[in-house]
Amino acid sequence: MNPTPPIKVLLADDERLVRSGFRVLLDLEDDIAVVGEATNGAEAVELARATRPDVVLMDIRMPRLDGIRATGHITEASGMEHVKILILTTYDTDENVFEALQAGASGFLLKDAGPAELLHAIRVVAAGDALLAPRVTRRLISQFTAHRKAAKAGEDRLAVLTYREREVLALVAQGMSNDEIGAALFLSPATVRTHASRIMGKLGARDRAQLVAIAYQTGLSQFTEQR
């Protein structure tokens, strides 16, 4: 039986001490391998193309090319569809987080997160799940989409979804797992997974993180409360 290959991680941060701290921590883990370090967004894009990492730890504020635009370049590039971006931010009020999710990031983490939280985040994102801190992400998305006239546009965009799919999407936006959604809607986790995949296909979402952004942007996050 072949051993599972380690999760390849690319570090992108313009602060040398931050990169060094992350590397020291990650190098201690048998299932994680650091494949490169980028000092700015442009380098992050170049190294992502060269190393094809599983996860990029991407700082938002970097020279030459910021983390949001670098995220877009990576997630839209052919052959890098599997690369997951985990945004790192110093401030939990950073309005760029929403734009980062729209650009294709799979989630974000505050830089002051503890070692266990960082390792968990990398493994979760590498597995294809979204990492969305409820205390930060939902508040940010609500804050920066509240002023948008999303009702009409949201209804048009969500018209392709069935009622059940809207229910599932609304619960995904609450951060529920497939098991939790299944329990709430009396569905099996496999059925929930199928619904989620269909929703992503219909809405053109890259992953569950983008589904959360869409749900808040269109106002569907309030769907379960209005039923």
Image (spheres, rainbow, N blue to C red):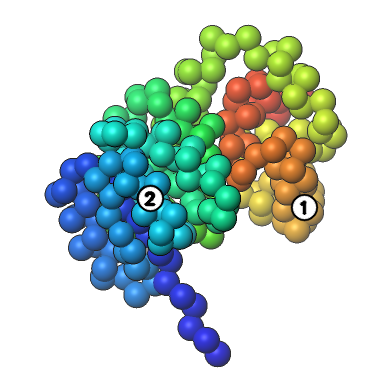
Q: Is residue 131 above or below residue 50?
A: above
Residue 81 in sight? yes
| Residue 4 in picture, x, y percent from top left | 49, 78
Residue 22 pos. (x, y %): 24, 56
Tell me if mark 1 has few (under 14), some (14-19) or many (20+) residues whose alpha carbon lies within 10 angstroms of its own.
few
Identify residue type, mark 1. Thr
Circle 1 sits in a helix, a strand or a loop, which is it?
A: helix
- The quarter of the picture where the N terminus appears is bottom right
Q: Which mark is residue 194?
A: 1
In the picture, the disc for residue 17 is: none
Q: Residue at x 68, y 33 (%)?
A: 170
> Does the image show residue 175?
no
Label 2 crowding class (10 Å Cα cut-off): few <14, some 14-19, many 20+?
Answer: some
Task: Please state which of the two labelled residues, at mark 2 or mark 1, is closer to the viewer.
Answer: 2
Instruction: Calculate the distance from the C-alpha at mark 2 to the C-alpha at mark 1.
Output: 35 Å
Q: Position of residue 111 (x, y in %)?
A: 27, 42
Q: Quadrant of residue 175?
A: top right
The vertical placement of 99 against 134, above or below, is above
- What residue is at 75 percent from the left and 24 percent from the top? 157
Q: Which residue is mark 2?
A: 46
